[in-house]
Amino acid sequence: MKRTLLIIFAVILLFLAGSLIWLRYGVDQDHLQSILSNALGPDYSVEIQSARISPLKRAVNLAGFTISSTTDNDLIFEADTLNVSGVGFRSFFGRSISISAVDMKNFIFVQDDSRTENDKEEPVGGASIRRINIRNLDLENGAVKARQKGNQNYILNELFVQASLDIRNISGEENFNVGYNRLDVDSLSVLFSDDRYRFSLAGLNFTRKNERLTLSSLRLIPVGGYDQFMRASPYEVDMVDLEIRDFTAYGINPAAFEQDSVIKADSLVFGYFDIHVAKNKQLPEKPYRKDMKLLNEIIQDMEYGLEFELISISNAHIRYSEQDTDGVRPGTVSFMNSTFRIREVNSRSRSPAVLTAVTYLQNHAELTTELRFTLDDELFRMAGTGELNSFDLTQLNSIFKDLEGIKIESGNIHELTFDFEISGDISTGRMHLLYDNLKLGFVDKDDYSQDLTMSARRFFTDHFVLRSENIPDENGTARKGEIDHEREPGDAFSNYLWQTLRSGILDVLLR
């Protein structure tokens, strides 16, 4: 897709710049159609409804501009209006184009994988452009569609962009690369995933000279919120609401990306990070659900390698919500006011990355964690330790009442520490948990009411299932929990971690 986009974009700019040279010969839309058709070759047809050329402004204004495939008459590119102004002449002769402004409204770009192979086999004209500099790029109401084997694969709608860019090394040869000397995006907004998500960002700046990328804000918003998102989903999915602010990447290495396909930087610093993930189990599972992968397998499936010395996240807020099959509303657990540091992230090294985190469970008690984990293509390994300060267990009712129909009447954790090891799909370890006065009740998930049946369940649970306390006896010993869990193939990595810790907790709680 990137190759086709660049070819079309470069050829459009070439023909626009070249048309200014031939103004004295009376160029009109028919001449422009002919110029671009010859440049693209016999596999493409071009239509331009009207063209206006302004010699003094070095500008071309097109209306009704269309590029289609001659073999199957499929649309490739269409724009109601395309305006280019301030095209530089001298730089053009040096295979470098400078443009003051590009404005495009109501456009559609269609990528078909059947044309991708043809593009690779038959480079357009063998020409190359060393540099394109656009001071003002304004794209309004665009759509990008992709087809795979004749079927539509994805679509982006309502694409709006205001930016400036300085691109280098754009080549028509089969082995080509593209690099940015400078990229400034004032704002970008787009709808995707069947118009269920809106993605937007503002204040993005990258300068190759200082090896730094900054971003003021990024948002991923479910359109219409939780209820509308879930109503529009045919299967069980995770809804994600994400906000990032004040992000900076230091020491970016473009050469590693261009030559070795590695995204490399000294550090990634997040000033603010907020994510809310929600699941509704009332929706059916996907009929052909793939097995979930471990963390290193997810990283290894990426097209590019990763290499960061440090990832620093401050002021982070994480929430997870889940609605049960018979639940009325989702229950939520939160990890607020968090700080994360991840060091030595390298997907091509066997050395483990190290994560240290300080967060507040339910914004109530401090939880500290250290995880060491591998990201290479060998067997996944992780070692983790953690400690939770004194915690009032009733704070967990925000998730248990709606998700399990359980109300924690009372209970206090005095000490909680754990350590575990993961090797592939097997986790083992130890859980130290001191608590007292644990009492549970059962409630209706609709209005949290209780009946006689629930009271009987409470009596049975308190006296025969759970241990109400785990405090050192006269010998100074308390029950230890053994962590022993085997991951199911369908379990996501986050669920695998929770099930690992849960096995140790239940080993202490259950009689």
Image (cartoon, grey):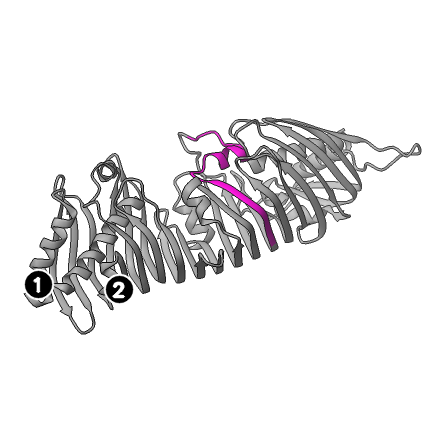
Image coordinates of residue 228 in percent, x first then y, are: 42, 51
Q: Give the residue type that dot 2 points to.
A: Asp
Identify the residue under disc 2: 103
Where residue 47 appears, as percent x and y from the top left, is 11, 54
Decide: few, some or many residues near mark 2? Use Cα within 10 Å; few <14, some 14-19, many ≥20: some
Q: What residue is at 14 percent from the left and 68 percent from the top?
A: 53
**Label 1 vs 2, first from the N-terminus:** 1
Mark drawn on residue 87 = none
Region rendered in magenta: 289-313
Secondary structure of the residue carrying tag 1 is loop
Residue 331 visible from this viewpoint: no
Badge 1 is on which residue? 28
Local crowd size for mark 1, using a 10 Å CA cut-off: few (<14), some (14–19), many (≥20): some
Q: Is residue 70 magenta?
A: no
Judge left or right: residue 111 versus residue 294. left
Q: Quadrant of residue 260?
A: top left
